[in-house]
Image (tube, rainbow, N blue to C red):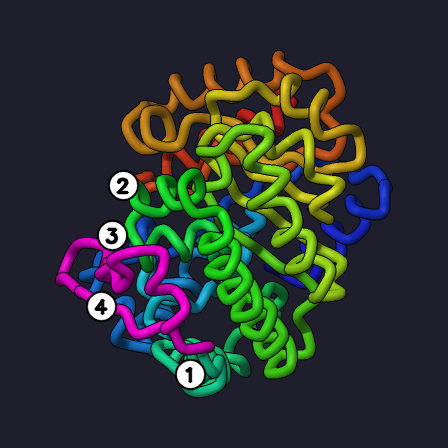
Amino acid sequence: MRNSSWNDLLELIDGKKLNYRPVGFIVDSPWIPGWYGIPVIDYYASGELWLKSNLKAITTFPDVWFMPGFWSEYGMCTEPSAFGSRMIFLENNLPHAEKILADISDADRLPQPNVKTDGLLPFMINRLKHSETAIREADHQIRFAVARGPLNIASFLMGTTEFMMALALDPEGSHRLLRKITGFICDWLAWQKECFPSINGVLLLDDIIGFVGDIEFNEFVLPYFRKIFSSTGAKVRFLHNDAEGLITASHLNEMGVNIFNFSFNHSLGEIRKLAGEEVILVGNVPPRDVLAAGNTDQVLTAVRKASQEIGNHERIIWSAGGGMPPDVRNENIEAFIKAVKEIC
């Protein structure tokens, strides 16, 4: 994020009012390579192209808060790689990690990753180190430590269906797996912050937490997310869950979350009622069907609809109800920015 935008975000968290309505998007490899015009594999393989494409995004849309900004990642392979997953990279599709647990009982044999040396993690850190001077010269800094959440990582290592069954059939085994992954996440976030002292924000992404009921949420989600967010000491504690999010919204304060990006299927007013007045909401236009597949008029209509879902427009970062999808064109982003200025 631009330094002035970061300062405004801190003001927003402190309860102060801005003199404008911020627009922000979660951007990473699903959107940037296609928008920049390079193969997905080149975005991952070339530090130079990764940097140039991110710099182009921030200069093309200087008023947008790109969060986390300069996200060093390898798609869904990032965290599983540290546990030993086989990684599949294709030229123009997002990579995926093969599952390595046949049963929840296999979790005990998983190594506890060394976040300084294992998998793709050192490559992520070094990419940022090599680019840090250019990032600073562009009036940005590395502000966020980023990780997928524990249930999300468990689903990569084991398979979503298999992991969900394990939660029901072997809760103790599931806890052992989640404790191991949570310890890894805490170590990984701490190492990112140690490498880049400018970090004072954390972004966790976990859609699997939207697949469980309230009882399971209290047992398998709440304690682990509370531990992760509290371990960081970060002022900005950002959670992304664009699956079912009503249960999540009602527990954000207990989890330690102060910024929440959620599914466009939930209205801003609905989430505000559950989350309370203090949490900053990030949303809420349909990403695929409107931002990517729609025209500028449809973007305008969707922003107007979102603005009418809630009476108080303070403490909102106007965005997609999820991350930025592939194929979003400049004109739709520009229409979104214009609509927020005129309507919100």
Please give the label number shown on residue 87. 4
Left or right of 263 on screen, residue 183: right
How far apart marks 2 and 1 lie (CA) works out to 30 Å
- In percent of width and height, residue 261 lies at 56, 38
Choose between 132 and 222: the one closer to the eye.
Answer: 222
Earlier sequence position, callout 2 versus callout 1: 1
Report if the CB atoms under discs 2 and 1 are less than 8 Å apart.
Answer: no
Left or right of 292 on screen, residue 278: right
- In percent of width and height, residue 251 lies at 69, 35
Left or right of 91 on screen, residue 10: right
How far apart marks 3 and 2 lie (CA) works out to 7 Å
Query: Mark 2 or 1, which is nearer the eye?
Result: 1
Earlier sequence position, callout 3 versus callout 1: 3
Query: Does 276 sit above or below residue 169?
Result: above
- Residue 19 occupies quadrant: top right
Earlier sequence position, callout 3 versus callout 4: 3
Disc 4 residue type? Met
Name the residue carrying label 1.
Answer: 122
Earlier sequence position, callout 4 versus callout 1: 4
Q: What element carries label 2?
A: loop
Choose between 77 and 208: the one closer to the eye.
Answer: 208
- In percent of width and height, residue 257 lies at 69, 46
Q: Is mark 3 on a helix, strand or loop?
A: helix
Disc 3 residue type? Gly
Disc 1 residue type? Pro
Report the span colored magenta: 83-112
Name the residue carrying label 3.
Answer: 34
Disc 2 residue type? Asp
Choose between 331 and 251: the one closer to the eye.
Answer: 251
Please give the label number shown on residue 327. 2
